[in-house]
Each structure stands twice: as structure tokens, then as C-alpha cells.
Image (tube, rainbow, N blue to C red):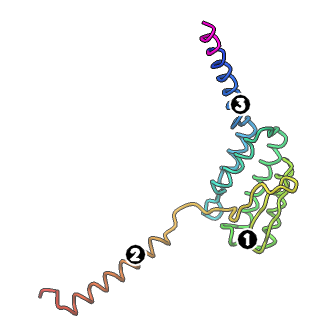
Amino acid sequence: MKKLISSLLIVCLLVITTITPTWAVGYLNDNEKELLVALKSTVKVDGATLCLQAADINTAENYMMQDGFDLTTEQKNIIINNIEATKAYLQANHIKDFSSITRKQAYDILVFLQAAANAIGLTVKLNAADRTISFYDGDKLVYVTTQVIKRTGYDITQTVVIGAGLVVVLLGAGYYAKKKHLFAK
């Protein structure tokens, strides 16, 4: 009987110690959930729909899931206001993709990005030469991205290349068939 009671106590202790930390890991408060919705939002610029890449959003989500990170309402409002300001800037300056951003526009957008990052104690550095954006927590590098804006929507480039390839193959087959007199008259 003592063994049974001891075993049950150990099992209960293991269950309690296992469940408590798992509940805390990966929890997002309401402010963090609202921020994720804002990060996942898109902006239309001259018919092109722009959004952050999934990897960037996942990194932000993982950062917010860290133990000890709790986004306050004030921080959330600062970040979301800067996201909306960035969207308005993209629309006002007709920026459709990352490669078309001038150095001045990149630094203008960096102001919004830095203001948002400052709200949670991060700093942002832009390397204009290779167009990378680095996020630092003090001296510790948190994340580096290479393409902030992703153009979504239908792109016919692949279709045109495949179609042109098929036309070339068809013309080559026709030429070969004519040369070998494979056409019946």
C-alpha cells in the first residue's frame, strides 16, 4: 500500500510540475495578439499588395513568447501606430517593392521602425549596402532580415517563360518533322 501511495504522489508531482511550465510557454496576452494581427495585415500600393514575410512574423511571435516578455497596451499602441504610419508612407510614396526603395526612403521607414522597436527596448540598424535590417537587444543580435517587403499577388513571369519554352520546343519539333518529311500530304 505504501508503494502505491508513493507512486501516486510521484505521478501527481510530475504531472503538476510538467503542466505548469508548459502552460506559461507560448502564451500571448491580448496586446501581443493584436500586434500579431497588425503585423499580418497588408497594404495596397498602386494595385500591388504588400506584407511582411511569414518568417519575420514568426520571429516576432517567438520573441513575444519569451518568458518574461509582456507587451503593455502603451507599447502595443506605439508599435501599431508606427505600422500604420509605415503603410501610409508606402502608399504616399508609391513603394511597391523593397528593391525600389531609395536610400532616403529606407531611412524614413527606419524612423518608424526604430520608434516601434524602442517601445520594447530594441534598436534597429540598417545596412544600406546589402539592404539588411538588424534588430538588437542591447548588444545581443535578435534578428536580421534581408527583404522586409514581399509583393503578393499573381506574377506571370513563370507562365511567360514556360510558354516561351513550349513555343520553342514546338517550333523545333515542327522544323524536325518537316526536314524528315514526317508530314503526310
How far is disc 3 from disc 1 in space, using C-alphas? Answer: 44 Å
Q: Which mark is residue 21?
A: 3
Q: Position of residue 94 (x, y in %)?
A: 70, 67
The N terminus - image quarter: top right
Q: Position of residue 61 (x, y in %)?
A: 70, 46
User: Which label sits in the foreground, 3 or 1?
Assistant: 3
Q: Quadrant of residue 85?
A: bottom right
Q: Residue at x 63, y 62 (%)?
A: 150
On screen, residue 99 above or below 12? below
- The residue that mark 1 highlights is 101
Q: Mark 1 or mark 2, which is nearer the start of the sequence?
A: 1
Q: Is residue 6 magenta?
A: yes
Q: Amino acid at mark 2?
A: Gly
Q: Mark 1 or mark 3, which is nearer the start of the sequence?
A: 3
Q: Mark 3 or mark 2, which is nearer the start of the sequence?
A: 3
Q: Nearer the viewer, residue 125 or 26?
A: 26
Q: Residue at x 50, y 72 (%)?
A: 157
Q: Quadrant of residue 97?
A: bottom right
Q: Amino acid at mark 3?
A: Pro
Q: Quadrant of residue 175?
A: bottom left
Most extreme residue toward the left, as rendered?
A: 185
On screen, residue 166 above or below 13? below
Q: Nearer the viewer, residue 162 or 81?
A: 162
What residue span does the magenta drawing correspond to?
1-7
Q: Which mark is residue 4?
A: none
Decide whether the magenta segment is chiefly helix, strand or loop. Answer: helix
Q: Residues within 10 Å of mark 1 (few under 14, many from 20)?
A: some
On screen, residue 53 above or below 157? above
Q: Which mark is residue 163?
A: 2
Q: Amino acid at mark 1?
A: Ile
